[in-house]
């Protein structure tokens, strides 16, 4: 369903050296996972026998019981579509191996031996087991059945491959999962029996999370639980599911009745990320045998949280940290350009709106970095037909509070002259009427920059660039655009973050700017000075457009999937038809306005999504949106 696959990490109740009881426990949990539409379920290392059997692994009684239990599990799972992976000690060529056994629908699909056997303080596995590293192109016999055996196995279900490694394999310098990933596997399953020590779970969690990021995949980890604890070691039953550097699900450790953790992994997203964002294709590969599974469970409903504001961290502390970093990137980029060009001033239009406010704050920080005067900033407020007293006064007050040079140039007279020159009726409030104002302002800024030996700083944000909501050769153009990588939903938070660190007067001005409706103020204002032209009434809510942008550009999601995700993310805020109508508009505008992005000015990239034609987004200006719109319909 939309590329999502449900997986489960299980830490069942384990009975040491009692395979039959363990088999019953595994089947009980396995049936529950199957009822929950789980495609693949993972159990811990040596869960059939128990990990801590020690020298009992040499006992024939124990091993015979393991083989009988495996057969019982197969017979009882014939009707289950869920692929499941269990750990068992198995003989091969008179050697004992610590193995991951992959099963489905009453059949052994393959057996992967543990590559690296620990021989350290708590674990003396080399006393009982042989390393499986290097075993390739072999078969193992289990109860008279020949089964693919080796570390060269990948398993194929749906349209993706998954790999298996066992506990210590992850802790080595080059885990097997890295080669599995390079050879195409998208999910990785680790059967483990990792004991718990103070703070060890943090390291283990970070290891799993990091490995999922390095492999650009999903990493599913299941460890032995409290009933495995014996003699000198205690186990917590840690289960973790991570996707490309983010932990999707994790259990509370030390549960007496075991644990099952589920997560729906976006396989389509992982595929797109590998193709679009990394040097994945250049990775060193190894040859693997592909073992095909039977048809597996498909999802009926996706159980996953979808952040409605993917550009904005929900945690306030994390959000402040993100704002500080973005602001520093913006200021550092501008400082480099100012230093390189040797300009006397930076020049920008200051409207009293969000974007120009953020640009001015960045300019101010840039001068602080360079040890220059705030008077080296020339802010120009250019009231026109739609300028309200609120935005006008906020622009002037902010410039005064920051100590920058402010000039006011009314554009109404120049625009009226231009209307006369080109024969346009000023009572016709069309695109000519609007764009004349934007281009007049840009001309003023450019000419002032020439006159003052300055550089024009652009103010348009990432969301406006995506939608093409700017006037070509007007506010579309500058000499360096500090906001080009910042989405609209984040602009308010950046200004608020600066406000929290400013003096009381400046903070009050900034907070009023934040609460002002977003508007280009190009249409005549109302009788009571109210803003009549509100951007989000025209093009739709920016929170929706930023959501669409994020999933389309970062993960290559198609419109139908984006619609599904948005309906889930904005449940109770917008209905499906409303979201669909704005998504349709987003797709149309995104395609139609590539020509503006093809010649956009330089500006700092601050996040993983950027639309510069020189870097992250290269698209033909004449591409049509028909296929995308057709799918949405």
Image (tube, rainbow, N blue to C red):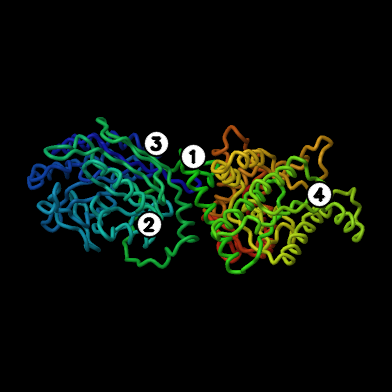
Which residue was labeled with disc 3? Answer: 36
Query: Earlier along the polypeptide chain: callout 4 or callout 2?
Result: 2
Which residue was labeled with disc 1? Answer: 316
- In front: mark 1 or mark 4? 4
Q: Above or below — where is 441 with respect to 261?
A: below
Q: How far apart are the two marked residues, 4 and 3, measured between alpha carbons? A: 61 Å
Which residue was labeled with disc 2? Answer: 214
Is residue 403 rendered to the left or right of residue 165? right
In terms of depth relative to the viewer, which is nearer, 498 or 232? 498
Q: Secondary structure at mark 4?
A: loop
Q: How far apart are the two marked residues, 1 and 4, measured between alpha carbons? A: 38 Å
The residue drawn where x is 87% and y is 53% is: 413
User: Residue 358 location, x and y as percent?
Assistant: 62, 50
The residue carrying pointer 4 sits among few (fewer than 14), some (14 to 19) or many (20 or more) residues within 10 Å by Cα, namely many
- In front: mark 4 or mark 3? 4
- In front: mark 1 or mark 2? 1
Q: Secondary structure at mark 2?
A: helix
Q: Above or below — where is 46 with respect to 36?
A: below
Q: How many marks?
A: 4
Which residue was labeled with disc 4? Answer: 384
The residue carrying pointer 1 sits among few (fewer than 14), some (14 to 19) or many (20 or more) residues within 10 Å by Cα, namely few
Q: How far apart are the two marked residues, 1 and 2, measured between alpha carbons? A: 28 Å
Q: How far apart are the two marked residues, 1 and 3, measured between alpha carbons? A: 34 Å
């Amino acid at each position: 369903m939309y590329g999502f696959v449900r997986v489960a990490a299980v830490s069942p109740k384990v009975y040491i050296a009692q395979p039959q009881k363990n088999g019953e426990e595994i089947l009980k949990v396995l049936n529950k996972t199957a009822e929950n539409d789980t495609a693949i379920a993972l159990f811990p290392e040596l869960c059939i026998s128990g990990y801590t059997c020690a020298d009992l692994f040499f006992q024939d009684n124990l091993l015979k019981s393991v083989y009988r239990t495996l057969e019982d599990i197969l017979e009882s799972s014939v009707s289950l579509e869920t692929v499941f992976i269990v750990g068992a000690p198995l003989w091969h060529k008179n050697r004992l191996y610590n193995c991951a056994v992959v099963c489905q629908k009453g059949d052994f699909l393959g057996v992967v031996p543990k590559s690296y056997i620990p021989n350290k303080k708590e674990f003396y596995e080399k006393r009982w087991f042989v390393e499986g590293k290097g075993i390739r192109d072999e078969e193992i016999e289990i109860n008279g059945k020949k089964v693919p055996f080796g570390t060269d196995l990948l398993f194929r279900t749906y349209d993706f491959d998954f790999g298996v490694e066992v506990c210590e394999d992850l802790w080595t310098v080059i885990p097997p999962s890295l080669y599995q990933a390079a050879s195409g596997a998208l999910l990785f399953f680790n059967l483990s029996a990792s004991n718990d020590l103070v703070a060890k779970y943090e390291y283990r969690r970070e290891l799993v999370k990091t490995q999922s990021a390095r492999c650009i995949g999903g990493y599913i980890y299941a460890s032995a639980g409290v009933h495995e604890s014996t003699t000198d070691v205690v186990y917590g039953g840690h289960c973790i599911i991570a996707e490309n550097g983010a932990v999707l699900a994790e259990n509370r450790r030390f549960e007496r009745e075991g644990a099952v953790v589920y997560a729906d992994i976006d396989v389509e997203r992982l595929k797109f990320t590998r193709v679009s964002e990394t040097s994945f294709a250049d990775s060193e590969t190894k040859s693997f045998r592909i073992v095909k599974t039977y048809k597996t469970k498909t999802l009926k409903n996706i159980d996953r949280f979808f952040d409605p504001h993917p550009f904005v961290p929900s945690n306030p502390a994390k959000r402040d940290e993100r704002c500080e970093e973005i602001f520093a990137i913006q200021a550092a980029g501008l400082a480099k350009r100012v230093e390189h060009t040797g300009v006397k001033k930076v020049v920008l239009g200051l409207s009293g709106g969000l974007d120009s406010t953020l640009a001015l704050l960045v300019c101010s920080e840039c001068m602080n970095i360079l040890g220059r005067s705030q008077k080296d900033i020339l802010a120009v407020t250019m009231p026109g037909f739609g300028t309200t007293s609120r935005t006008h006064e906020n622009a002037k007050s902010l410039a005064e509070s920051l100590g920058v040079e402010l000039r006011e140039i009314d554009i109404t007279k120049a625009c009226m002259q231009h209307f006369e020159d080109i024969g346009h009726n000023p009572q016709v409030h069309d695109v000519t009427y609007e764009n004349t104002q934007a281009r007049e302002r840009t001309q003023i800024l450019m000419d002032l920059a020439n006159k003052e030996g300055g550089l024009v700083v652009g103010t348009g944000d990432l969301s406006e660039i995506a939608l093409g909501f700017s006037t070509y050769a007007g506010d579309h153009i500058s000499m360096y655009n500090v906001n080009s990588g910042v989405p609209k939903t984040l602009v308010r938070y950046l200004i608020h973050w600066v406000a929290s660190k400013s003096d009381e007067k400046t903070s009050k001005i900034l907070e009023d700017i934040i609460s002002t409706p977003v508007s280009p103020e190009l249409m005549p204002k109302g009788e009571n000075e109210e803003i009549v032209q509100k951007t989000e009434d025209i093009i739709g809510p920016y929170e929706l457009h930023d959501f669409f942008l994020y999933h389309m550009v970062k993960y290559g999601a198609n419109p139908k999937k984006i619609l599904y995700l948005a309906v889930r993310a904005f449940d109770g805020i917008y209905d499906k038809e409303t979201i669909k109508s704005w998504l349709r508009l987003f797709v149309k505008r995104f395609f139609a306005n590539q020509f503006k992005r093809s010649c956009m000015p330089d500006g700092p990239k601050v996040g993983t999504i950027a639309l510069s034609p020189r870097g992250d987004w290269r698209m033909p200006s004449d591409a049509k949106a028909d296929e995308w719109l057709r799918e949405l319909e």
